[in-house]
Image (cartoon, helix red, strand yellow):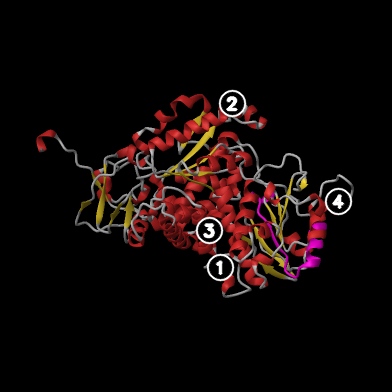
């Protein structure tokens, strides 16, 4: 990878506006020095332009004959890729084609995403990425990111030390154990860090060279993967306990030493590990967990949007949460904080929630309840009469019948968890039931929007984790809001990088949430969508980034001096996917000194 000083030339640029390369802004009319040529240049996804190499560049880099004679443009290439995608028979086939494009020509890949966000987002991330992880071994062709396997635990620092990674600023890491609602996918879980990092760039504007996806391969307990002849991961059952913790710590310490100011995002770890690692390392490194904090932020903003429609403020709501792992707890904690901001005491805010996990409603006598869940446990004396039989678990229907929640949130990964009986009962007690089946992918959703509309006579306000087709209500099509984390984490990451934050505070997460709330369509139109169009996610990302950076300044975590410097860093960290003219890097010999 070559990032030499900018060289100014008189030839006209084929790029548009400003182009950011690293922390240096390259202005229209300037060119980028490249040391690669021929096959090496064409085979570099970072620098490849395909048919858009100009005749001048083909002369300079010995590309004649390697490329067809037509000299194209980025616009033409985008249309060609869109046509190729339209001819693919399944979403997975489209996902595979896009992964190949990313590994062939990054500029074209990101230009395609940025210009067609609504169409491309479900293909590069949820719901299609779920199948992409399940079938990752079928389509893996070229290295992207790093697989750090347990047998190489003593080589982690050596692997990270390669100069290729000198410009890395942010990492998304997973161990593949809890991929969406699909469970353990082992090395196939790499599809998640790759997908998240693609959205860092497409929606946050963060340069691809600053992004490093990592998969910690500690084995898998998925027997289908272990028995598969084409599985690319370490063929071993998962390492657990002290050995697992030591491996993760070795990774974190190596990352801290290699990149002292790195942003580390945890993704799709099992619930207990997700919360443990966030708690353990949040004061050691600049880090956040999107499953916990990103999900909480977008879910909370969507709840506030629903409150704009109902006209009943958030602190007056009663909330049932089905699935009280890391995501459910994160949503509950953030919503409770917003309730406290409206005047409730911490105890009063916690009392507005009913947490339902695998053994039903969590009470003070629930077996295996984790310490972080206990603040939301209901007193046994309060709920004893709710049981349909003595010593039976308290089900969602029992909670709905007795507590009469106005909001129902699902992050259980259990399809059908929102039963018709429970939803119809809920609809008896609230005129506009707010129901969010948030589990991904689509096959794991707690209920379908069409069923929810049918069971509530079309009155439900619905947010889903994955995209769904519009529901039919009395012959009319009603669009369904996707509460996609993509509204939050790209802007959050950009704000962290631009402010050079040392740590990620709870207040920074809340600032990201509030900025999204400031742009809800329901502020102006109660008939509007609960969230802005996903096509606006890139522009929203910039606004969220600035809000996060300003909060980092207030929290004393920023390493920029003021908001003016923050704005300059935001400009410097946003990359636009356009082709920049290339020049051959000059070789400096001893005789030229």
Quadrant position of the C terminus in the picture: top left
Q: Is residue 89 visible?
A: no
Residue 538 location, x and y as percent? 46, 60
Residue 285 rendering spot, x and y as whole percentages:
45, 42
Residue 275 position, x and y percent, is 59, 43
Q: Earlier in the sequence, mark 2 or mark 4?
A: 2
Q: Earlier in the sequence, mark 3 or mark 4?
A: 4
Q: Determine the secondary structure under disc 1.
A: loop
Q: Which residues are magenta?
A: 421-444
Residues at marks 3 and 4, CA–CA distance in whole angstroms:
37 Å
Q: Which residue is mark 2?
A: 235
In front of the other: 577 or 550 = 550
| Residue placed most toward the observer, 194 or 407 | 407
The residue indicated by pointer 1 is 520
The residue tagged 4 is 387
- Residue 555 is left or right of residue 372, and the answer is left
Q: Which residue is nearer to you in this view: 223 or 411?
A: 411
Q: Is residue 7 above or below residue 151?
A: below
Q: Residue at x 74, y 64 (%)?
A: 453
- The dot on residue 510 is 3
Nearer-N-terminus badge (1/4) = 4
């Amino acid at each position: 990878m070559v990032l030499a000083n900018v060289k100014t030339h008189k030839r006209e640029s084929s790029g548009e506006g400003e182009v950011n390369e690293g922390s240096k802004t390259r202005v229209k009319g300037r060119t980028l020095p490249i040391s690669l040529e021929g096959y090496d240049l064409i085979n570099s996804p970072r620098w490849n332009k395909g048919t858009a190499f100009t005749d001048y560049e083909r002369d300079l880099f010995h590309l004649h004959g390697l490329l067809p004679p037509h000299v194209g443009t980025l616009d033409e290439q985008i249309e060609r890729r869109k046509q190729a995608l339209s001819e693919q028979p399944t979403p997975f086939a489209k996902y595979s084609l896009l992964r190949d494009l990313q590994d062939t020509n990054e500029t074209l890949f990101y230009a395609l995403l940025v210009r067609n966000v609504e169409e491309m987002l479900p293909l590069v991330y949820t719901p299609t990425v779920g199948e992409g992880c399940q079938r990752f071994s079928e389509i893996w062709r070229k290295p992207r990111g790093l697989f750090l396997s347990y047998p190489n635990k003593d080589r982690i620092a050596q692997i990270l030390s390669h100069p290729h990674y000198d410009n890395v600023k942010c990492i998304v890491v997973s161990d593949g154990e809890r991929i969406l609602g699909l469970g353990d996918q082992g090395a196939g879980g790499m599809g998640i860090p790759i997908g998240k990092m693609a959205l860092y760039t497409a929606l946050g504007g963060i340069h691809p060279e600053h992004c490093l996806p990592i998969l910690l391969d500690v084995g898998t307990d998925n027997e289908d993967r272990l028995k598969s002849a084409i599985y690319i991961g370490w063929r071993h059952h998962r390492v657990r306990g002290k050995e697992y913790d030591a491996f993760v710590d070795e990774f974190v310490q190596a990352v801290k030493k290699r990149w002292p100011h790195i942003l580390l995002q945890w993704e799709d770890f099992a619930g207990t590990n997700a919360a443990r690692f966030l708690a353990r390392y949040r004061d050691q490194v600049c880090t956040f967990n999107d499953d916990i904090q990103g999900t909480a932020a977008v879910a909370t903003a969507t709840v506030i949007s629903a409150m704009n429609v109902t006209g009943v403020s958030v602190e007056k709501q009663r909330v049932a949460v089905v699935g009280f792992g890391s995501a459910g707890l994160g949503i509950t904690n953030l919503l409770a904080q917003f309730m406290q901001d409206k005047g409730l005491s911490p105890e009063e805010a916690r009392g507005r929630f009913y947490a339902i996990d695998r053994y039903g409603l969590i009470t003070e006598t629930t077996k295996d309840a984790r310490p972080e869940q206990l603040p939301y446990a209901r007193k046994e004396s309060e709920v004893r009469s709710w049981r349909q039989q003595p010593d039976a678990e308290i089900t969602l229907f029992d909670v709905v019948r007795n507590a009469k929640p106005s909001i129902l949130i699902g992050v259980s990964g259990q399809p059908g968890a929102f039963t018709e009986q429970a939803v119809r009962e809920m609809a008896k007690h609230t005129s506009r039931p707010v129901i969010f089946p948030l589990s991904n992918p689509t096959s794991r959703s707690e209920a379908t929007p069409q069923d929810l509309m049918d069971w509530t006579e079309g009155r439900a306000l619905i947010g889903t984790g994955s995209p769904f087709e519009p529901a039919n209500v009395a012959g009319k099509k009603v669009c369904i809001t996707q509460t996609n984390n993509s509204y939050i984490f790209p802007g959050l990451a950009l704000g962290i990088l631009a402010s050079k934050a040392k740590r990620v505070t709870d207040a920074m997460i809340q600032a990201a949430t509030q900025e999204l709330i400031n742009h809800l369509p329901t502020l102006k139109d109660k008939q509007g969508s609960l969230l802005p169009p996903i096509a606006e996610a890139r522009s929203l990302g910039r606004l969220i980034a600035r809000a996060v950076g300003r909060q980092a300044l207030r929290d004393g975590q920023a390493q920029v001096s003021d908001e003016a410097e923050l704005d300059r860093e935001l400009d410097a960290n946003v990359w636009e996917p356009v082709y920049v003219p290339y020049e051959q890097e000059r070789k400096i010999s001893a005789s030229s000194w």
